[in-house]
Image (tube, grey):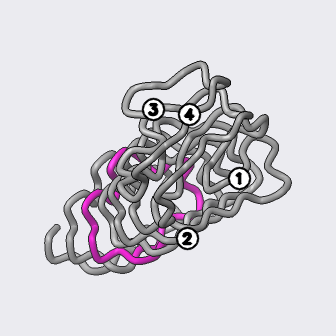
Amino acid sequence: CSSLTSIKTPDTVKSIGKYIFNGCSQLATVTLSSIIPTIPEKAFGSCSLLKTITIPTSVTTIEKSAFYKTGLTQISIPNNVETLGDKVFDSSKSLETVSIGTGLKTVGINPFISCTKLSTITIDSANKNFIILDDMMLSESKSIVYSYLLGKDTTVFTIPDYVKTIKHSAFYEANNIYVMKIPMTVETLEENA
């Protein structure tokens, strides 16, 4: 599909398969069916010209690496999305802004891993599971770090006292940080934290 530039799936389409548009390097415009419940694994992997996409409100799950290495600059995750799988936006190096709706309940391994320009995540205040604080995406209780905003230019970072767990790859590729201070309150550092 290296020549495909645009795709529109009709509303009769109830699902799309894994890797369906993976490697469509010229794909720039996508309109998805308004009834699909899932954006599957690497559905848009390596779609480097894909700068924007509207996620249908029917979607409740975005699977592992669905938007791996895209050209997305911003993304809005609607209220109906409950699950972000592992590394959903992995290596989408142009991604700067993310907004997350009220429904998100579960995230896998850092959904924003290697998004080196990501400087803003907003989470709807009605979301009872996650917050943004001190340049990190945290559990609502503030005890778990899921992701650090890699687009920040902080060179010295102190993990706040309220953190107990730093999840898998939360600070992966935080190359601007030269000194990280971890308090005694932290009990768990997961793989590649």
The image's mark for residue 97 is 2
Quarter of the image holding residue 129?
Answer: top right
Against 39, residue 159 (above or below) is above
**Amino acid type of the residue that numbered disc 1 sits on in the rendered structure:** Leu
The secondary structure making up most of the magenta span is loop
Q: Nearer the viewer, residue 33 or 164?
A: 164
Residue neighbourhood size for the residue with mark 2, other residues' Cα within 10 Å, grouped as few (<14), some (14–19), many (≥20): some
The numbered mark, 2 or 3, whose residue comes first in the sequence reads 2
Amino acid tagged 4: Ile
Query: Distance between the Cα atoms at labels 1 and 4?
Result: 16 Å
Q: Amino acid at mark 2?
A: Thr
- The residue identified by callout 4 is 182
For marks 3 and 1 on the same chain, the one whose residue lies earlier in the sequence: 1
Between label 2 and label 1, give the one nearer the viewer.
Answer: 1
Dividing the picture into quarters, in which one does residue 6 lie?
Answer: bottom left
- Residue 104: x and y in percent read 68, 46
Mark 4 or 2: in front is 4
User: Looking at the image, is mark 3 or mark 4 earlier in the sequence?
Assistant: 3
Q: Are marks 2 and 3 in contact (CB under 8 Å)?
A: no
Residue under circle 3? 168
Q: Residue at x 29, y 57 (%)?
A: 45
Q: Is residue 5 positioned above or below 48 on the image?
A: below
Disc 1, SS: strand
Residue sitting at x 46%, y 36%? 109
Q: Nearer the viewer, mark 3 or mark 4?
A: 4
Q: What x and y, as percent, mark residue 92?
A: 36, 63
Instruction: Check contact, mark 2 vs mark 1: CB within 8 A.
Output: no
Cα–Cα span, label 2 and label 1: 15 Å
Give the side of residue 114 with respect to residue 2, left or right: right
